[in-house]
Image (cartoon, grey):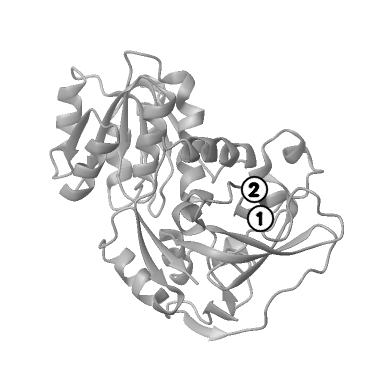
Amino acid sequence: MKAVRLHAYHQQPVVQDVPEPGVKGPFDVVVKIGGAGVCRTDLHIIEEQWAEKSGVTLPYTIGHENAGWVHEIGSAVSNVAVGDTVILHPTPTCGLCQACRAGDDMHCVNSTFPGINTDGGMAEYLLTSARACIKLNPSTRPEDVAALADAGITAYHAVRKAVPLLYPGTVCVVNGAGGLGHIGIQALAALTATTIIVVDRNEDALKLASTLGADHTVVADGKHVAAVLDLTSGNGAEVVLDFVAEQGAQQDAFAMTRRAGSHFVIGYGSNIDIPTIDIISTERNVIGNLVGTYNDLAELMVLAQAGKVTLHTRQYPLDAALDALADLDAGRVRGRAILTP
């Protein structure tokens, strides 16, 4: 089968032939990939930012946002059958550790993360587990929903955590309206009655945000922090969802957060430099966010199949994976790039 393989850091992956995966354990599932999302994390992987954390051995296949059709199942699999349309939670988990039993399964101590520390889904087939599979309506096209498997639940998980803070009369700033941010806007609109302010440097991204539920849009032009403060009577927002968190955006996000507010860090790439006195004197919170749980993905798919959350995508054949990565890196993708093997 064809797969997108990374052979060395700081070099582009290559599309090459590798053996198809097969079922080995009783709960294994092999999925024929119908859509694989292209994520900024894939760029960070190539840049070696994940090397120490993942411990992966090169070469390997990247791709951690996957949907498709069940191709083969292990002897103990009962929740899906061959031919079923599925979206895959990005971390196959054990179901037995304390995190799994608490429903906090993205912190499973025995999980793998295909595309990060094992072979991923930018390929024709992917080996995963029954615990990662969410069965979808057979009419669902995997390429339309694949990015919800990571970008979607990462955004949804952050919104879900912020919901108790976003009662009517509050303000939420969405910092960055790209691949994750445009999903976060829709999740906010579906789950809360908060006022949504979207900040982005790209005018097209802001136009899209306006159609998805943003109440106000602000161009990130160096004056955007002041603009947000003006829109909030000088107070800032109860919640800032920072989908950028690099190149200074992470500092702006904290500056747009009001006293006793919460800065949710979802994007990554740079350090946050905050004087501790500014944290304690205003009781502001900085909250990290990692992917989301299986239940988060199940809930998100309910919204997606009801038409309340939609992905704006640009599709590429698998052979054009390097074009998709280049377009993402250059900011030419509105929404999400999807590979279609």
Up-down: is 47 above or below 287?
below
Residue situated furthest bottom in the rendering:
17
> How far across and down, in percent of the image, does residue 335 sit?
33, 53
Q: How many badges with numbers are in the image?
A: 2
197 vs 286, left or right, is left
**Cα–Cα span, label 2 and label 1:** 7 Å
Along the line of sight, the residue nearer the viewer: 211 or 83: 83
Q: Please tell me which residue is depicted at 78% across the width and 49% down the height of the picture.
A: 94
Q: Please tell me which residue is depicted at 19% across the width and 20% down the height of the picture.
A: 234
Q: Quadrant of residue 52?
A: bottom right
Is residue 260 visible in the rendered image? The answer is yes
Q: Amino acid at mark 2?
A: Lys
Q: Secondary structure at mark 2?
A: strand
Quadrant of the frame with the N terminus: bottom right
> How far across and down, in percent of the image, does residue 58 sit?
60, 78
Could you tell which of marks 2 and 1 lies nearer the N-terminus?
A: 1
Which residue does the numbered mark 1 point to in the structure image? Answer: 84
Along the line of sight, the residue nearer the viewer: 274 or 117: 117
Residue situated furthest front in the rendering:
139
199 vs 77, left or right, is left
Which residue does the numbered mark 2 point to in the structure image? Answer: 135
Tag 2–tag 1 contact (CB < 8 Å) = yes
Q: Please tell me which residue is depicted at 41% across the width and 39% down the height of the picture.
A: 309
285 vs 123, left or right, is left
> How far across and down, in percent of the image, does residue 320 sit?
39, 77
